[in-house]
Amino acid sequence: MPFTIRIEAESGIAIATCSGTLTLPDAREGAEALWKTPGWMGRSAVWDFRSAEFDLSSGDIVEIAQFILNHQPTPPPAKIAFATGRSVDFGVSRMFEVYRRDPQTAFRVFREYDEAIRWARSPDPDLA
């Protein structure tokens, strides 16, 4: 799965844009790439999956959620947003949300990219 990660100069949030088919190894690689991105200091991140599709089993979802919880930097990111284009990927992302629960990180799944960006930039974790 090809992806790019850029850091917004003003907000400091990371925006990861993904395309192609996303598998478990791709998800691990993407998480690790985000954590190592120069200039990203654990602030919010938006994963743009609108040009991607997930090829993940329910076991894969549990595994990547545990991998992230066990390996993410300290402190973890304040907010993580997923923006998906396909309904099935939205559902898979909601499953990930359940397994990814971390009281230090707000997590939301969006169908609209602009809403995901607006939420990630906002200081209010409840803004939707």
Image (tube, helix red, strand yellow):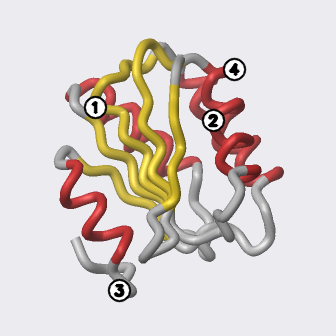
Please name the amino acid that badge 4 sits on.
Answer: Pro
Please name the amino acid that badge 3 sits on.
Answer: Asp
Residue 55 left/right relative to 64: left
Residue pointed to by mark 4: 25
From this view, report whether residue 49 is shown above or below residue 67.
above
Evaluate if marks 4 and 3 touch, with contact meaning CB atoms under 8 Å apart. no
Label 3: state its secondary structure.
loop
Q: Residues within 10 Å of mark 2 (few under 14, many from 20)?
A: many
Query: Residue drawn at (69%, 68%), measured in percent from left and top?
Result: 76
Residue 125 left/right relative to 23: left
Residue pointed to by mark 3: 124
Please name the amino acid that badge 2 sits on.
Answer: Gly
**Mark 3 or 2, closer to the camera:** 2
Q: Residues within 10 Å of mark 1 (few under 14, many from 20)?
A: some
In three-dimensional space, the C-alpha distance between marks 4 and 1, rounded to whole angstroms, equals 19 Å
Residue pointed to by mark 2: 30
In three-dimensional space, the C-alpha distance between marks 3 and 1, rounded to whole angstroms, equals 25 Å
In three-dimensional space, the C-alpha distance between marks 1 and 2, rounded to whole angstroms, equals 15 Å
Evaluate if marks 1 and 2 touch, with contact meaning CB atoms under 8 Å apart. no
Which quarter of the picture shows residue 47? Answer: top left
Label 1: state its secondary structure.
strand
In three-dimensional space, the C-alpha distance between marks 2 and 4, rounded to whole angstroms, equals 9 Å
> Between disc 2 and disc 4, whose residue precedes?
4
From this view, report whether residue 113 is shown above or below residue 48.
below
Query: Residue drawn at (76%, 50%), measured in percent from left and top?
Result: 36
Residue pointed to by mark 1: 50
From this view, report whether residue 29 is shown above or below residue 2.
below
> Between disc 3 and disc 2, whose residue precedes?
2
